[in-house]
Amino acid sequence: MKHEADIKSEIINVGKRLYEVGLCVAKSGNISARLDNENILITAGGTFLGDLKQDDIVKVNLNTLKSQDIKKPSSELPLHSLVYKNFPAKVVVHAHPPLINGYFALNKSLKALTFETKFYLGEVPVIEQDTPTVTKPEAVIDALKTNNLVVLKNHGVISMGGKFEDALALVEALEEAVRVAAVARLFEKEAFDEIDAALKENLTKNETAYPMFSREHIQAIVDLVNKDEFIRSKGKELNLTVQLAVKLDDTGDAYKFNFEQGEIISLDNDANAPFIISAPRAVWEQVFLGKIDSFVAVTQGKMKLQGQLGQLSKWYVPFSRLFQLFKQVKFKP
């Protein structure tokens, strides 16, 4: 376990990074990290993230939200504390990036113009804000169930992760995605329209509801996949021949898809495969509801992947279609 002084040093470095790349200015933003099961470290209110000192970071008890330090914790402490109470996150970064704030002040969503944006960010939730400090954190917590990065409209962003590098990367990636969108408007072209249309058109629905992660539920997904002309054609084009297993962490139930040229030729009740995607029930529910992209969930750590993500990414397009078919089958939680 890291010492308190070491974690404070990490927070100081993160503050410098945010300031240096222009993701926070003056006294905006706040940073926290889990110290142990009962305590977190969080920047004090009114501090400059670009010039933090050790005593600008205070220790707070998660149960009482009290601190023994002289300086008071950030006014966003209630939001930070709820993140740690609801997720296994180790760090939280709240910043006020100018491009992100400007873009989402006028737009409800961001169209992904690069594969990196689609792959690592997915659909970033945008939560309306009524006050300078987040006073309705429950909506933010719900949004974080689908993405480790959430936009707070007219306010900033909040990002969580297992380490600061991951949380920072999401914020920086979104700021860059907004910059790319702004540049793209100069050329008046839309990217990914053809792929997006192909992935979404003519999706067949299965109206019968099955217990989630039951054999019947997964088999219904297989039936849709094997009827899907887009997956079949892309599977042949990209030689989609692989074994991919999905696993429910809560019970250990697992199913193995045996793909051959884009067709699932058999479904086995085991996880003996070179690629295994696993997650707890709450995450799988979001996946089957279509609220989480499985690729994004893996890159953000909400789902675990055994096997190399880079190898699976060559089949990004047909697998994206596959994950969209997931939500076409009704299930009972």
Image (cartoon, helix red, strand yellow):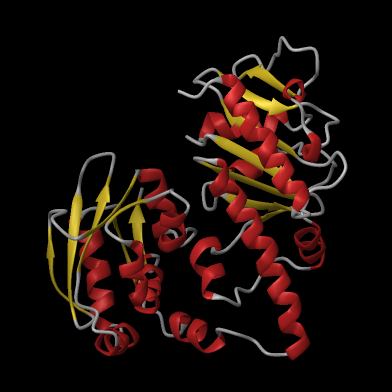
Please provide percent x and percent y for residue 119: 49, 67
Against 102, residue 202 (above or below) is below
* Quadrant holding the N terminus: top left
Residue located 27% across and 47% down the image: 248
Please provide percent x and percent y for residue 175: 70, 62
| Most foreground residue, 148 or 280 | 148
Residue located 20% across and 47% down the image: 253
Against 88, residue 304 (above or below) is below
Q: Quadrant of residue 191?
A: bottom right
Looking at the image, residue 4 sits to the left or right of residue 282; the answer is right
Residue located 45% across and 86% down the image: 198
Looking at the image, residue 69 sits to the left or right of residue 221; the answer is right
Q: Quadrant of residue 263?
A: bottom left
Please provide percent x and percent y for residue 139: 65, 44
Residue located 27% across and 86% down the image: 232
Looking at the image, residue 247 sits to the left or right of residue 270; the answer is right
| Most foreground residue, 78 or 200 | 78
| Most foreground residue, 199 or 261 | 261
| Most foreground residue, 317 or 164 | 164
Please provide percent x and percent y for residue 231: 31, 82
> Exactly how many numbered labels are in the figure?
0
Q: Residue furthest top?
A: 68
